[in-house]
Image (cartoon, rainbow, N blue to C red):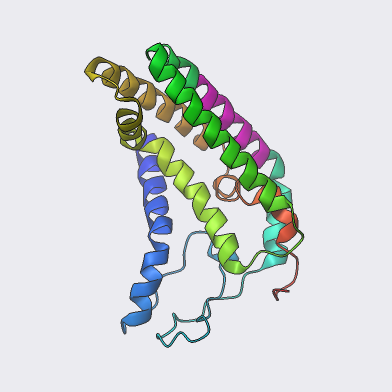
Amino acid sequence: MKQRLLIAILTAAVFALGYSSGLWVERTRPVPAPPAALMGEFSSKRSPAPGDNRVPVAARPPLNRAQLTAEIERLRPQIDSYRQRIETLDAEFDRDLAAILTPEQQATYAAAQKSRAARMKKSAAELTATAELFTDDQIDQLRQRSLYGVLWMVAPSMKQDSLIKDLKINAAQQAKTNELLRARREKFLAIVDSTPPPSIMLSRLAPAAQRIGTNQEKK
């Protein structure tokens, strides 16, 4: 079950992360438009930028903002629960990781985590600091960021490579961090098993849901 779920999550994450580059390719090749994306009922219509002479992608249905807002409100308890459980999982990993690091490595990692937390706090504040409506592209980007978070959790090698590069962990530490990362992945998959997929997809967008609007036209 978890193996199949992992494959499905990775497939969705890779598709979303490659979507932007795919747009360029599709605009310059005479091939049929790609199939509807995950959660296509919330998809947006793309228009060429001013002065863009490339062939546009076949028009998709306009983003249904009222439906998207209603879905966020319906799932908000699950979305909030998911975010809190992930924060707890991250805190547990950081505590277990610190136990196998040297004091110097601990200081470096703590500084990096503090900087990351500050960036995330600033980003969250910026999302809610204005009443200006999101564009359709901004909404898509926030959903894709949620998928990137999933990929980060289910692909231990990404975090492992980062730790090797930033902390210069030795072979013994690498073996232990690999165990911690695989344990974290199993715990994360357990959270995914009990969380409706849309709650995960919308977790980055929900805090600023008021900027979606409830009409079909951008203001």
Is there any visible trace of residue 94 in the rendered image? yes
Q: In this rendered view, identify the residue nearer to me: 49 or 27.
A: 49
Is 89 magenta? The answer is yes
39 lies above or below 54? above
| Most frequent secondary structure within the magenta stretch | helix
Residue at horizontal 56%, vertical 55%?
A: 142
Q: Quadrant of the C terminus?
A: bottom right
- Residue 193 shown left or right of residue 71 in the figure: left
User: Which residue corresponds to the image point at 29% horizontal and 22% vertical from the top-left?
Assistant: 169
Question: Which quarter of the picture shows residue 54?
Answer: bottom left
In the displayed structure image, the side of residue 105 where residue 175 appears, left or right = left
* x and y percentages locating residue 168 in the rendered image: 29, 25
Is residue 41 in sight in this rendering?
no
**Left or right: where 75 falls relative to 109:** right
In the image, is residue 115 above or below residue 58? Answer: above
The answer to whether residue 71 is magenta is no
Q: Which residue is painted at 42% across and 11% down in the image?
A: 99
Q: How many marks?
A: 0
Residue 45: horizontal and vertical position, in percent?
56, 75
Nearer the observer, 188 or 100: 100
Q: Is residue 168 above or below residue 214?
A: above
Give the camera-side residue of 123 and 95.
123
Q: Quadrant of the N terminus?
A: top left
Q: The magenta stretch spans which residues?
A: 78-92
Q: Is residue 189 above or below residue 9?
A: above
Give x and y (percent) for residue 162.
Answer: 35, 34
